[in-house]
Amino acid sequence: MLRVGIIGMGFMGITHIQAWAQTPASLVGIVSADRAQAEKAVAQYGGTVYDSLADLLPHVDVIDICTPTYLHREMVLQAAAAGKHIVCEKPLALSVQDTQVMLDACQKAGVMLLVAHVVRFFPEYALAKAIVDRGEIGRVGVVRLTRASFKPASKNPQSWFHDLSKSGGMMMDLMIHDFDYARWIAGDVETVFARNIASRFADVPGDHAFAILRHTSGALSHVEGGWAYPAPMFRTALEVAGSEGLIEHPTGSSVPLGIHLRQTQTSDAEIAVPSSPLAENPYVTQIRHFYDVLTGANTTPRVTAEDGAEAVRIALAAIESARTGRPVAIQEMQS
Amino acid sequence: MRIGIMSYAHLHADAYIENVRAIPGVELIGLADDDLDRGAQAAGAFGVNVFSSYEALLAEKPNAVIICSENANHRPLVEMAAAAGVYVLCEKPLATTVEDAQAIVDACYKAGVMLMTAFPMRFSTPVLEVKKILDADGLGQVYAINGTNQGECPKHLRAWFVDKKLAGGGALMDHIVHLADLLRWTLRSEVVEVYAQSNDILYAGETEVETGGLVMLTFASGTIATIDCSWSKPPYYPTWGGLAMDLIGEKGLVTVNAFKQNLTVYTHSRKRPHWAYWGSDANQAMINEFVAAIRENRLPRVTGEDGLRAVEIVAAAYESVTTGMPVAL
C-alpha cells in the first residue's frame, strides 16, 4: 500500500488530504506549522502528526508538499535525499536555478517529482486539450486564457501570499496556471511581453496583468491574471482558435447552477477556487492520477517536473518583462 | 439635405444607404464607384441612383458624402470631396498610413469641411453605458482593460479586405481601430506605448495578410489595455464576430459586450445556430450624428483627428510586429 505524508495544512493541504482519502493510499502522517489543523485532519483521515519533515519521511513512500512556495526547494531536496517520491504544489519554485537543482536532485535520487498543475485536470481544460490533440481545430493560432479573482488572504497582511519573496506575487502564483496550460496547448514559448498594474499604481490593493506569449510554433497566447476583482468573484475563460476551428469557453459558462437566496451571503473565503458541480472534483482527479503514476498503473504523467520548471520560467519571464518594460526571450531566463 | 456615397467597396455601405434614407429631410442622391459593375450591384440591390463617376456625383453638389472605398483609396476620395467643399464621413480605418491620415485631416481643415470618422461603436448603447460609468468616476482609477474585437476573415464578403495594397494589412488594420478609439474615448487619455504580435495560422494559405493579432497598449493615465484583433471566428460562427471589454478598476469590474443583445436561432435551412441581433442600431445613431452635426454646424462627436489617432496606433502596432519591441507614441 502506498504510504503518503503531507506537509502543509493550509487551504491546499486540506484539499489534497481530502483527495488522497479517495484513493487506496494510506495517509500515514502530517506535518504542519498549524498543529491544531493537523490534529483535526488526522482525527478525520487517520495518520499521525509529526513534528518535522525529517520525522515524517522515514514512514512514507511519497511526500505531498503543500507548503508556501518559498519552502518547496528545501523540502523537495530533503525528500529526494531520503529517496521519497514527491508531489509538489505549484509553483514548483521561485527561480529557474531552484527548479534545476530540484529536478537534478530528484533525477539523481531516482524519485518522481509530480507538480500539481491542477488546471490540466479540470475537465473543460482537459477536454479542450484532447480536442486540439485530435486535430479537430487544426493548427493552434491564438489562445486566450483568463483567471482573475480577489487578493488571497486579504484580511491577513502578514500572509505569505503578500510577500513577493515568498509567493512570487500574482503572476507567479496565479498566472502560472495558464502559462502552463498555454504551453501544454500551443507548445514551448519563445518570447513574453507582459504588463501589470501593481507597479503603476502604488496604492492598488490587488494586482492585474496581461501577457502576450509567442510560441515556437508561431501561435500567440493572451494570458490575463488578476487579484484585483471584488470578492468573492472568480472568473476563468478559455478560448483556442485554430486553422480549422475554434473552441470557446467564456467566463461563466461553466456555471450550470444558480443559487440566489434572499439572505445576503457574505463571503469570508480567504482564497477562491473555481468550482463546478462534478461527480469528482478536479483536485481528486489529479491526486488519483498521481496515485496511478506512483503505483506504476500509469506510466505517462500528465504533468512532469520539466513542465513545472518550464511554467516557472515563463512566469519569471513575464515578471521580468513587466518590470523592465521590454519583451523577454525565454532563453534569457537561466537563473 | 442631400448626401451621396462614394464607392461601394466597403460592405458597410449597405447599412449606410438604409440609414440615410431613414432620416427625415435627408435625400440619398446616389452612389458612384470607379468599379462600374460594383456600382450597378448597389443600384440593383437598393434601387440607388448610380453616377458614372465621382466627379459626376460631386457635380450634383451634395451637402455631404460618405466614403466607403477600399482603405487605401480613402485619401484621394476625401481630397476630391474636400476640394468640392463637401462634408465627409469616412469609413474606418481613416487611412492605411499615418501620412495619408494626416493628409486627409489637413485637406478637410484647409477646405473648411467637416470630417467625421466612421466609428459606430461609440454609438453602441451598451458601450455608452460604460462611458457614462467612467465619466461619473463609477469605477475609480481604471487599472486594466481586456478588449476583444475578433471576427471572421472578411475575405468572402469583399476580396480586397485581404489585399495588402488595398486594405493596408490584415487583422491588425481591420480590427485595432474600433477598440483603440473606444479606449481613448472612455479613458480620456492617449496611448503612449504599443506592443503587438501577429501571425497567419488562422485561415492559413487563404490570405497574404496577418490573420491573428494581439496588441498591448499603455495609456498616459497608466491604464494598460489589450486588444485581440484576430480573425479568429470561423465563417460558420453564429455571427460575424464581436466587440467586448472587461474593465478592471479601483472600484471593481465592469464588463461590456456590444453584440450580446441577440436571439439564438436554429433553422432547418441553416443547420447551425445563428445570433439574430435585436439591440439598438449603432450605425443609424452614427449617421444621425453626422447629419445633426452638419445641420447644427458643429463638430461631430467623432472627428477626423480621432481617426488619425487610431491610425497612429495601428502603424505603431505594425512597427512593433516588425521590430519585436514596444513602440513609444
Image (cartoon, coloured by chain):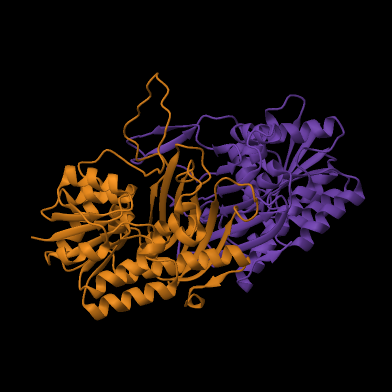
Chain colours: A orange, B purple
Q: Is residue B177 shown above or below A139? A: above
> Where residue A268 sits: x, y (%)?
41, 34
Q: Identify which residue, B163 or A48, lies in the foreground.
A: A48
Residue positioned 77% across, 50% down in the render: B54
> Where residue B81 sits: x, y (%)?
83, 49
Q: Identify which residue, B241 or A164, lies in the foreground.
A: A164
Residue at far top of view: A262
Is A235 situated left or right of A86 in this image? right
Q: Can residue B70 be seen at all in this image of the molecule? A: no
Q: Can residue A56 be seen at all in this image of the molecule? A: yes
> Where residue A307 sits: x, y (%)?
34, 68
Is B28 situated left or right of A265 in this image? right
Residue at far left of view: A1
Q: Quadrant of the C terminus of chain B?
A: bottom right
Residue positioned 74% across, 33% down in the render: B289
Residue at far bottom of view: A108
> Where residue B159 sits: x, y (%)?
56, 58
Q: Quadrant of the N terminus of chain B?
A: top right
Q: Identify which residue, B18 or A238, lies in the foreground.
A: A238
Is B134 situated left or right of A96 in this image? right
